[in-house]
Structures are given as C-alpha cells and as structure tokens.
Image (tube, rainbow, N blue to C red):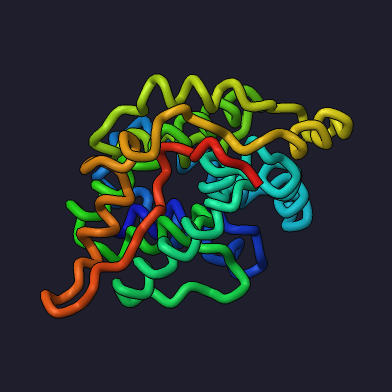
Amino acid sequence: MKIFRILSALLTYPTPEFVEALDEIGAALDSERLLDADRRAALRALVDNMRGRDLYDLQESYGLLFDRMRSLSLHLFEHVHGESRDRGQAMVDLLALYEAKGLTAPSAELPDFTPLFLEFLSTLEPAEALALLDEPVHVFAALAERLHKRGSLYESVFRALVDMAAAQPDAALLAVLRQEPDPQPDDFGALDAAYEEDAVDFGAPADDACGKDTLAAKLRQARRPAPDMAPPTFRTEFTHSPSSHS
C-alpha cells in the first residue's frame, strides 16, 4: 500500500535526499484516495511546511520531538515495554516476521522504529497490513495527542494512521499511555525523570493479553511452520507490558 510508504518517508530524519523528494511525496498524496480530503490536506500542509524550511531547521525540530522525547519516541515498544527485558524478545520476534516476509531491516535501526514498521506494512497485502496496523493504534493515537499539544504538523501522520486502522484505539490502553510523563523538550529535569520511569504496565495478565486479537497471535499465524516443523515461540505484542521489570 503506497500510503504506508508515504507516511514512513514523512517520519524519517530529514536529509537532502528527503527534501528533494518532497515534490514527489506531495504528488503521491494528491493521488492517494485511501484517506479523505481533510486528512490529505493536513498531510499536504506538513509537506508544504517542510518544503519551505531550511534543512538544518527541519533536522533540529525532528530531533527535539522524536529523539529527545521519550513520550514521542518513534520506537513502538518504548511505549509498551519501556526498558523491561521483554522488549528485547519483542524486537527479535518482530525482526523475524520482517525476514519471513522478505524485508531485510537495516542493521543500524531497531525493528520497532515506526518508519520501518510502516515500510514493512507497505509490502503486505492490504488486509494483512491493516490488520497489523490495528495493534499499535492506541500508541499512534497517544502520539497524535502529544503532537497536537505542541502544535506540530507531524500530528497529521498519526491521525492518518488512526483513521486507516479498522479498530478504534482501546480506551483502557490509551488511558495508560496518557499517564506517561510528557515534558516539554526544554525541561531537562523532567526529561531526566521521565527516562527513569519504569516500563509501562498495562495491567493485563500475559495469558489474557496474548489472545487471538493480539499482534503476537498474528505473528504466530503469519509464520506458522510446515507440519513437520516445531512452532516458534512469540512474545511480541503492542498491547501489554508484563509486570516484571529489568
């Protein structure tokens, strides 16, 4: 699905090559009909804003939002597992899914990096891509709210992702994310305190959280082995964090 590739590009760190591609990205948005006119207009405003700014200004703004702010991290499992040891296994499982579907992830990037996840979705059949999009939709909704609070046009990317998902953000999971510390990027004391917080614990027992509608189950289905092979063990999910912390 082309729209996922567009949104992935908009969330990557601005480079000279990215700036040169903004006209192409804008044209692709104009021809995209999966989103309604208002959502396309909001994304086009982001593209037009980027086109009119200095590259170093774009890079600084990006870094202040996504690199400095834990609450705005583009690494999905940061919002689910925090620094718990379960995050590492979740990474392994997600990377295995990418490889099973033929995507080779860059060695310098973690598999839960949102632009990489969206690039992966762009390679799948629409039904499968949208089914996987449903799993982190509450994370995308929380990120959209936090960007709205800062008046950032990047909000439009996450609003588009929430709109495309078939499932609405789970109210209970979203409520937990709203409780995360969300300091301003220049509040260094609050930033330090936020990084000392425990991993998010959504409070659901592991058995309940790994039912048929979780990403873990979809991963198991996607990589179901041949009858004569032992099934792999998966613990990747966007919907809960175990109570044990590192």
Residue positioned 76% across, 28% down in the render: 184
Residue 227 in sight here: yes
Residue positioned 54% across, 74% down in the render: 106
Left or right, 189 with reference to 230: right
Query: What is the tally of numbered marks visible in this picture?
Result: 0
x, y percent for residue 200: 57, 34
Residue positioned 44% across, 51% down in the render: 7
Left or right, 56 with reference to 31: right
Residue 42 in sight here: no
Q: Looking at the image, which is closer to me, 84 or 139?
A: 84
Left or right, 159 with reference to 110: left
Residue positioned 14% across, 76% down in the render: 226
x, y percent for residue 26: 44, 53
Residue 39 position (above or below residue 100): above
Residue 172 position (above or below residue 26): above
Quadrant position of residue 222: bottom left
x, y percent for residue 154: 56, 39
Point out the residue furthest to the left here: 227
Residue 217 position (above or below residue 69): below
Quarter of the N terminus within the rendering: bottom left
x, y percent for residue 99: 37, 74
Q: Looking at the image, which is closer to me, 63 or 80?
A: 80
Q: Looking at the image, which is closer to me, 109 or 205?
A: 205
